[in-house]
Amino acid sequence: MNDLHRVAFSVLDLASRKDTDQGAAPALQRSLALAQHVETLGFTRFWVAEHHNMDAIVSSATSVLIGYLAAGTQRIRVGSGGVMLPNHAPLVIAEQFGTLEALYPGRIDLGLGRAPGTDPITARALRRDRNGSADDFPADVAQLQAFLGPRQPGQQVIAMPGVDSHVPIWLLGSSLFSAQMAAQQGLPYAFASHFAPRMMMQAIELYRQHFKPSAQLSEPYVMLGVPLVAADTDERAQFLATTTYQRILALMRGQNMLMRPPVAVDAMHELWSPQEEHSVKEFLSMAMIGGPETIAHQLQVLLQHTQADELMFTCDVYEHTDRLRAFEILAQLQE
């Protein structure tokens, strides 16, 4: 059986700036063009992630960007992968996503993370007097669910829009905490294997083992993040992947992460040390890099190993046309 026919394909985009971009607009426009492209290819959803104080990523006003993407598409689900809930009052998120759901009914997802998505100084600037903490995450999620659900007798504060909208909530995580919580609450679970694959199988097994059905979900549902560099040949993909390597190397060095042009594969040895190469490739150990046959084989192995229900791909390549082609190749594997 071809597992690729049963699994849903989706996209996580960071609205990334290139080294030649002037301001944020080109990255945002490329994000919309990519969403429109994968919608025509039949992808299930298109998510953007909340990051702050990063010169290369312009998806910080996540709900605003989701509105832009939803307005420019017709069918594909659009959502957050995710909103970092410690940075926000649950009521504010309920109102934002309630508004989105009212405007684009049946197309909005609310993925939630419990990390700040930034450095401690920026987190303090975001929250001001709000003492947001990962420790508050379960209570904040419960409050958010209440705001998005039906109004209760005696309820004094409502989210308008938001009340009775039942925007689907996903829990995101890279450790066992969110897996356990998603299982207990009967929520779909997205594991951040695109940057933190180490605990993937342990988290999936914990989630499935302890899953309790809920009004939102009757059976466990697992989504995995997967870095993708697909091209027409293995050699071309390995060349394009050097942009991804340079970006992760910059992240590890604390340098700016603007996307840089690819370089010859052998030239990477001049850019990183053996230790850095090991660290970058460990970070990207879930990456699918290659031509169509190579990608198909890698995905089959992953799906047989994990039995994931959905794969959400990130694709950090330099030229927009190469990114569009990567997702065309991916879609053709399901035909």
Image (cartoon, rainbow, N blue to C red):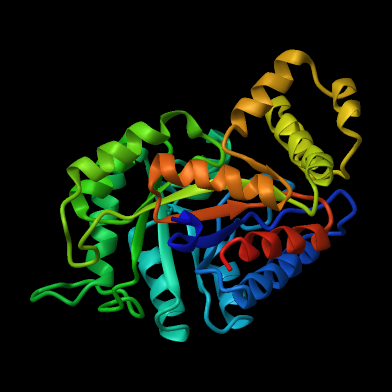
Residue 198, visible in the rendered structure: yes
Closer to us: 304 or 237: 304
Closer to us: 329 or 13: 329
- Up/down of 46 relative to 179, above or below: below
Quadrant occupied by the C terminus:
bottom right
From the viewer's perspective, tell me whether residue 85 is left or right of residue 33: left
From the viewer's perspective, tell me whether residue 284 is left or right of residue 98: right
**Residue 310 pos. (x, y %):** 44, 57
Closer to us: 164 or 327: 327
- Up/down of 105 relative to 329, above or below: below
- Residue ID at (66%, 28%): 281
**Residue 253 pos. (x, y %):** 73, 25
From the viewer's perspective, tell me whether residue 309 is left or right of residue 150: right
**Residue 254 pos. (x, y %):** 71, 29
From the viewer's perspective, tell me whether residue 25 is left or right of residue 89: right
- Residue ID at (82%, 63%): 321
Toward the left, the furthest residue is 153
**Residue 122 pos. (x, y %):** 57, 41
- Residue ID at (24%, 59%): 143
